[in-house]
Image: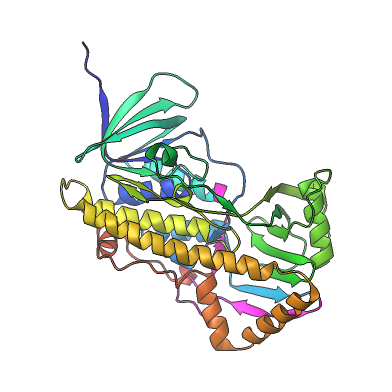
């Protein structure tokens, strides 16, 4: 009987969204052999997540991608906060540590395209699209997975030291691993869309908190702007785009036309955290492991931090038959702590911003106006919202990663 032929690699990754692609780029830059499998044939064409925090830019700098992300994105250094009657104050990110003293907005589809180009250029990374992972088995020394064409066909087996599950919020692998948990929806929905920017607000974010609901607006590259409004109706006879335009006009007095929306959607924020991030030599990262409210832009950046930490573990552990358990235990502990901090902030920001009624809105305006009038408070808020204060963990392997990567350091701002 003919023996089964195996593909081999140091690390296999299921899913090439922003988290899986970033992980592959980190490991490839550190010299590990990596195979990445993605069900899609091409990058997504929807905008989706847009905020890239300064801590993520610093991590992208380790593989030399921060300059391109900044160049193709929009640097947001200030957010203006309003209530229904007036401007309450401004939150500046200029007090953050340099050189990335701003938040970059870049559609997730563009970020994924940038990462795909980089990982395809790495000689020790093999990237296969149109492929899905159907089964994963493991022993104390290796992991074996079945890799199959997404549209049907002959399956192959891959043998690797470690496996990363990055197949997103709707992926099936956490269920196969027995670590899945039910999602917990929050009791509110939002409408969201991108359109050409005719506000004249430039590269400034605007947040509106009114008795009738909240509205967030962020500048995007190519003269576009993202709008996110608290939905006020479950009437399905009104399209998502029409409701968004009506809410923007009512809250911010900005006229949008549904025909001008480049993309629109409705979403209900959810929360989920898997039972375990790690199972043997397999780890989950990003939305495969956790889901939180997207309000505040914490989710994707938490996933990128998962990839950063797991890459550090793999750089230290690949090739070891013993001793990797301690490293993975540290990853589990630290990433759970980071998720709790990020998810709590996202939920709290969403709850505070969506309180309706004149009494609640008046109290919120008084608190926000007071907080934004003190430099020490605005500096603290800038650090909170930009995720500078999310605990990263103290595991020494995190520092070992930077030594293995080709990381000359980020260029000065005037070199971008």
| Image side of residue 368 versus residue 83, left or right | left
Does the rendering let one see residue 41? yes
Colour mapping: rainbow
Q: Position of residue 166 (x, y in %)?
A: 43, 45
At a point 18% along the width and 46% down the height, the residue shown is 319
| Image side of residue 243 versus residue 346, left or right | right
Q: Position of residue 52 (x, y in %)?
A: 52, 61
Q: Position of residue 198 (x, y in %)?
A: 77, 61
Span of residues in magenta: 85-109
At a point 72% along the width and 47% down the height, the residue shown is 262
Is 296 in the magenta? no
Quadrant assignment, res 313 = bottom left
Quadrant assignment, res 122 = top left
* Closest to the observer, 72 or 335: 335
Is 99 in the magenta? yes
Q: Quadrant of the N terminus?
A: top left
Does the rendering let one see residue 205? no
Residue extending farthest to the top is 1
Instruction: From this view, report whether residue 299 is shown above or below residue 112.
Output: below
Report the label total: 0
* Closest to the observer, 64 or 397: 397
At a point 50% along the width and 23% down the height, the residue shown is 151
| Image side of residue 361 versus residue 21, left or right | right
Instruction: From this view, report whether residue 156 is shown above or below residue 297.
Output: above
Q: Position of residue 347 (x, y in %)?
A: 58, 64
| Image side of residue 82 versus residue 383, left or right | right
At a point 37% along the width and 22% down the height, the residue shown is 155
* Closest to the observer, 335 or 38: 335
């Amino acid at each position: 009987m003919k023996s089964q032929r195996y593909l081999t690699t140091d690390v296999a990754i299921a899913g090439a969204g922003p988290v899986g692609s970033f992980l592959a780029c980190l490991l490839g830059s550190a010299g590990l052999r990596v195979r990445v499998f993605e069900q899609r044939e091409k990058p997504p064409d929807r905008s989706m997540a847009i905020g890239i925090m300064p801590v993520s830019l610093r991590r992208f700098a380790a593989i030399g991608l921060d300059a391109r992300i900044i160049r193709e994105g929009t640097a947001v250094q200030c957010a203006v906060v309003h209530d229904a009657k007036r401007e309450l104050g401004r939150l500046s990110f200029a007090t953050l540590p340099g050189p990335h003293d701003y938040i970059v907005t870049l559609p997730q589809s563009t970020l994924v395209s940038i990462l795909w180009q980089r990982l395809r250029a790495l000689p020790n990374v093999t990237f296969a699209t149109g492929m899905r992972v159907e089964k994963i088995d493991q022993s104390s020394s290796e992991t074996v997975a079945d890799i199959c064409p997404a549209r049907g066909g002959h399956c192959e087996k891959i043998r690797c030291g470690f496996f990363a599950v990055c197949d997103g919020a709707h992926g099936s692998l956490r269920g196969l691993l027995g670590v899945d948990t039910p999602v917990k929806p929050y009791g509110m929905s939002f409408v969201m869309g991108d359109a050409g920017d005719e506000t004249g607000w430039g590269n400034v974010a605007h947040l509106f908190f009114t008795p009738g609901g909240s509205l967030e607006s962020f500048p995007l590259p190519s003269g576009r702007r993202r709008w996110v409004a608290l939905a006020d109706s479950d009437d399905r006879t009104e399209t998502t785009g029409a409701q968004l335009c009506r809410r923007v006009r009512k809250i911010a007095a900005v006229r949008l036309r549904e025909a001008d929306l480049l993309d629109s959607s409705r979403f209900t924020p959810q929360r989920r955290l898997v039972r375990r991030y790690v199972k043997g030599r397999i780890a989950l990262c990003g939305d495969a492991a956790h889901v939180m409210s997207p309000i505040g832009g914490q989710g994707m950046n938490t996933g990128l931090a998962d990839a950063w930490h797991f890459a550090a573990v793999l750089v230290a552990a690949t090739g070891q038959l013993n001793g990797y358990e301690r490293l993975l235990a540290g990853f589990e502990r630290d990433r759970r702590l980071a998720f709790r901090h990020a998810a709590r902030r996202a939920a709290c920001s969403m709850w505070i911003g969506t309180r309706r009624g004149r009494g609640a809105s008046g109290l919120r305006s008084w608190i926000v106006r007071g907080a934004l009038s003190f430099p020490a408070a605005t500096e603290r808020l800038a650090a909170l919202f930009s995720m500078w204060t999310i605990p990263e963990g103290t595991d020494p392997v995190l520092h070992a990663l930077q030594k293995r990567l080709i990381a000359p350091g980020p260029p000065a701002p005037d070199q971008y």
